[in-house]
Image (tube, rainbow, N blue to C red):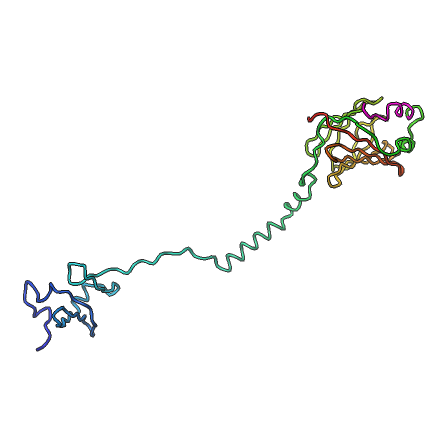
Amino acid sequence: HPPPTLSTLPHPTPPNMGAACTHVGSAEGQLVLECDDGEESPIKSTLTRLVPSALPVVNSPHADDDFSVKPRPKQRSRPPSASPKTMHLEDSFQQLQAASPLRALRAQRPGAQLRPDFSGTWLCDSIFGDMEALMIALEVSWTRRTAASLINYGAGFVSRRIQQLGDDMEMEIIGTPNDFIQQFRVGCGQQKAQGPNGECLVNPSWDGSCLRIETSELDGTLPAVTRHDLQGGGLMISMTAKGETAGWKFIRQSSC
């Protein structure tokens, strides 16, 4: 007998539609199902048009219908990975930032590194070196040298009040025969400032964590170098002139 088709099946209820069917194969232009009673039911292109070819037919024994049509699960999307071209552009941009002249200028400016803070009121506690030889190198008169030696060159008497804001410095020297206030900016080259004998020239600069000040008279005579260092919680100030070096040790009295 020829296999039954949709047109030859009786209506309204086709035979064996209540039985579970399993997909066993396909022929050209038709879909073949095998029912529970062992018979094969070919379903021609009419059923094919009802079921889109993009949707696979899967067995669903728990469904009420003869067969179920379930869409294929969607694949989870992944973010696109960076292409070699994009990675190359990012690397080039980072290299450009590292080589920026402005970045290099900021790294080289005087205030870029952490500077010591000399702010506070400091009292001279002791002296070191040959003070007499240093004062002779500075061409200090005998009368003033004698007066300075009588008060131990300021130990226990002389104090300094320092205010610092970055590279801007103000030093007030108190307790000497000629008190004065000296103001300057570190790293700005030679500039005029007040000294013990009136106006003078100073050239302050940073030498690591040390404040180095070159001083001279307005005509360039009597050159000397003064160094300020923070050591062991104290302020060490040394002065060198014509190869002679001596200095003062200060202890902090208060912070500004």
Question: Residue 56 location in percent, x, y?
Answer: 25, 64
Q: Position of residue 51 (x, y in %)?
A: 20, 63
Q: Residue at x 88, y 31 (%)?
A: 131
Q: Is residue 57 above or below residue 246?
A: below
Q: In which quarter of the image is the C terminus?
A: top right
Residue in front for this viewpoint, 146 or 47: 146
Residue beneath the point at 9% across and 77% down: 2
**Is residue 170 placed above or below 22 in the rendered structure?**
above
Q: Main secondary structure of the magenta part?
A: helix
Which residue is rendered at x = 24% and y = 65% of the image? 53
Q: Give the range drawn in magenta.
A: 145-156
Furthest residue toward right:
142
Estimate the x, y position of residue 202 in percent, counting from the top left. 80, 33
Q: Residue 7 lies in magenta, yes or no? A: no
Residue 75 in picture, x, y percent from top left? 34, 58
Q: Quadrant of the N terminus?
A: bottom left
138 on left or right of 232: right
Spot the residue most to the bottom. 1
* Residue 150 falls inside the magenta stretch: yes
